[in-house]
Amino acid sequence: MLGLKVTRPLHTFLLLISYRSPDPQLSADVVKRIARSYIRHTYDIRYQAASQMTGYMESSWKSLKAKMERSAGALANLEKDLDVINPEERPTYFLPACCTSTTISPRPRWTGRVRKLRLMRSRAAHCRLRKHPPRVSNCAPWKPG
């Protein structure tokens, strides 16, 4: 093919394909087929590279999975030999009764303190609205309403 010319402009990823022939239809067909062949070849190369990478990743994943299973088995044997307590398998008996019982709630211990803090803050806010400190004697005692 004497009239075929393939060039790549500088600093681009483009290919310029040209073919000179006395028949314009033949020139267009040759250029289209060469471009399609190049595109198909590029995709085939990428597909093969992706297939090889997938195979590599699958084999790596399988070997890592096998190592992890062996390590888990070795850890289980070591825990069994050393009589280690696994917190997920055995209940813990050293928790306080208020945390393990469903009938006893730790809340009643805090309700009195929370109520006092709320009352103190609301009195301070009431006196701030009257523009004087809360401990001034002319501030009328505030009753929650």
Image (cartoon, helix red, strand yellow):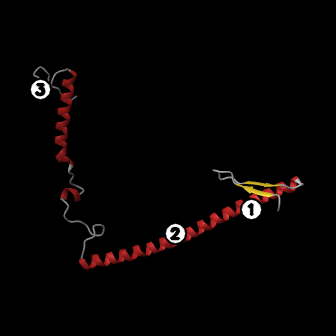
Q: Residue furthest left?
A: 137
Q: Describe residue 91's horizontal placement relative to residue 52 as left or right.
A: left
Give residue 99's quadrant in the image: bottom left
Q: In the rendered image, which quarter contains the C terminus?
A: top left
Q: Residue at x 71, y 62 (%)?
A: 40
Q: Position of residue 129 (x, y in %)?
A: 22, 22
- Label located before the other in sequence (1 or 2): 1
Q: Position of residue 44 (x, y in %)?
A: 67, 65
Near mark 2 (Cα within 10 A), the count class, few <14, some 14-19 or many ≥20, is: few
The residue mark sitting in front, 1 or 2, is 1
Amino acid type at mark 1:
Ser
Q: Residue at x 41, y 75 (%)?
A: 67
Question: Whole-Å distance between the Cαs marked 3 and 2?
Answer: 74 Å
Q: Position of residue 5 (x, y in %)?
A: 77, 57
Q: Describe residue 137's horizontal placement relative to residue 6 as left or right.
A: left
The residue closer to the viewer here, 132 or 19, is 19
Question: Whole-Å distance between the Cαs marked 3 and 1?
Answer: 92 Å
Near mark 3 (Cα within 10 A), the count class, few <14, some 14-19 or many ≥20, is: few
Q: Residue at x 19, y 56 (%)?
A: 98
Q: Which mark is residue 57?
A: 2
Q: Residue at x 36, y 75 (%)?
A: 71
The residue closer to the viewer here, 57 or 88, is 57
Amino acid type at mark 2:
Met
Amino acid type at mark 3:
Arg
- Label located before the other in sequence (3 or 2): 2
Give residue 128's quadrant in the image: top left
Q: Determine which residue is flagged by label 3.
A: 135
- Label located before the other in sequence (3 or 1): 1
Q: Which mark is residue 37?
A: 1
